[in-house]
Image: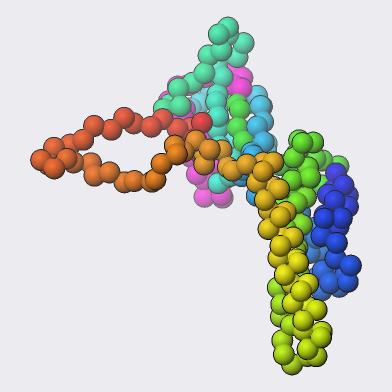
Amino acid sequence: MLADYQALVDDLVRDKDQVIALAATGARETAIAGAVARYSVDAPRAVVEDVTSDGTQRLDTPGEWTPGVSALRSIEYPIGNIPTTEIDPAAVSLYDKPDGTQQITLLITPLEDDELRLTYTALHLVDDTHDTIPARHKRAVACLAAADLCGQLASYYATDSAPTIGADVAAGNQSKSDRFRKRQNDLLAEYTKVVGTAPAERLKPASADANPERTDSMGRQRLFHPTRVWPGGPV
C-alpha cells in the first residue's frame, strides 16, 4: 500500500534536515506517483478481461484501458477453444473518438452478446487500498522515487553552496550535494538492476541502429518483411 512506499522512501532518502518535507507539500507522494508511472512503462501490468459484443465490428475498450498507454496483447475469440483461438492482429485496430476515448475495431463481426477475452497492458495502481506492483519490485520502485528526491536535495544543497554564505557552510552544503548525487545514482542503479530496461528495449538486437535505404545501388526495390504488431504497441 502507499504507506509502505512512503516508509521505504523515507528510509532510502535519509533527509535528516527535512528539506523535502519543509520545501514542498506532497513532494514524496509526487515522486512515488512518478516512479509508479515509470515502472508501468518498464514493466506494464497485464490485465485479462472479458468484453461483450453488441453485434458490430466495434468493442468498447475495457475498464482499466488508458488511451496512449495501454496496448493490446491478444483477443481470444471464441473463448474456450483448445488450442486457444485468437484474432489475427492484422484484423484489429484502434479507433480514436473526439472525447479522447478509444474503441477497438475488428475486421470480423462477432455475434451479439458473444464474449471476447482481451489481454492488454494497464498502469500499475498504488494507493491506500491497491498495490499491483509485485513484491519483488516494491523496493526497486521505492528506490526510483527516492532517487528523484535525492536529485532534488543535491540541487538544493548545490544552490546553497554559493560563496555569498560562509565558507564552512558552503563547503558543508557542497559535500551534502555530492553525497545526495551519489545516493541518487546508486538508487537508480539498484532500480535498473532489479527491474531492467523496458521490454521494447530488451527486444532490440545487440547492434547499432540503422535506417537502410529501400532501394539498392541499382535503384531496385529491396525486400522487407512486414512487422505485425498489436494496436497500441508491440506484442
Residue 8 is at least partly visible in this image = yes
Residue placed farthest to the bottom in the image?
A: 164
Residue appearing at x 77%, y 81% in the figure: 171
Question: Is 103 a magenta residue?
Answer: yes
Residue 207 horizontal side relative to residue 154, left or right: left
Residue 39 horizontal side relative to residue 19, left or right: left
For this rendering, which residue is in front, 131 or 199? 199
Residue 146 sits in quarter: bottom right
Residue 151 is at least partly visible in this image = no
Residue appearing at x 78%, y 78% in the figure: 173
Total number of numbered discs in the rendering:
0
Residue appearing at x 53%, y 38% in the figure: 202
* Whole-percent x, y for residue 128 in the image: 86, 46
Residue 108 horizontal side relative to residue 214, left or right: right
For this rendering, which residue is in front, 199 or 11? 11
Residue placed farthest to the top in the image?
A: 82
Q: Looking at the figure, which quarter contains the N terminus?
A: top right
Question: Is 160 a magenta residue?
Answer: no
Name above or below for residue 20 compared with residue 94: below
* Whole-percent x, y for residue 73 in the image: 55, 29
* Whole-percent x, y for residue 53 in the image: 58, 24
Residue 92 horizontal side relative to residue 151, left or right: left
What kind of colouring is applied to the model shown?
A: rainbow
Residue appearing at x 82%, y 47% in the figure: 127
Residue 12 sits in quarter: bottom right
For this rendering, which residue is in front, 181 or 132? 181
Name above or below for residue 57 compared with residue 161: above
Instruction: Tell me where the magenta segment starts and ends, as one range.
Output: 92-117
* Whole-percent x, y for residue 20 in the image: 82, 69
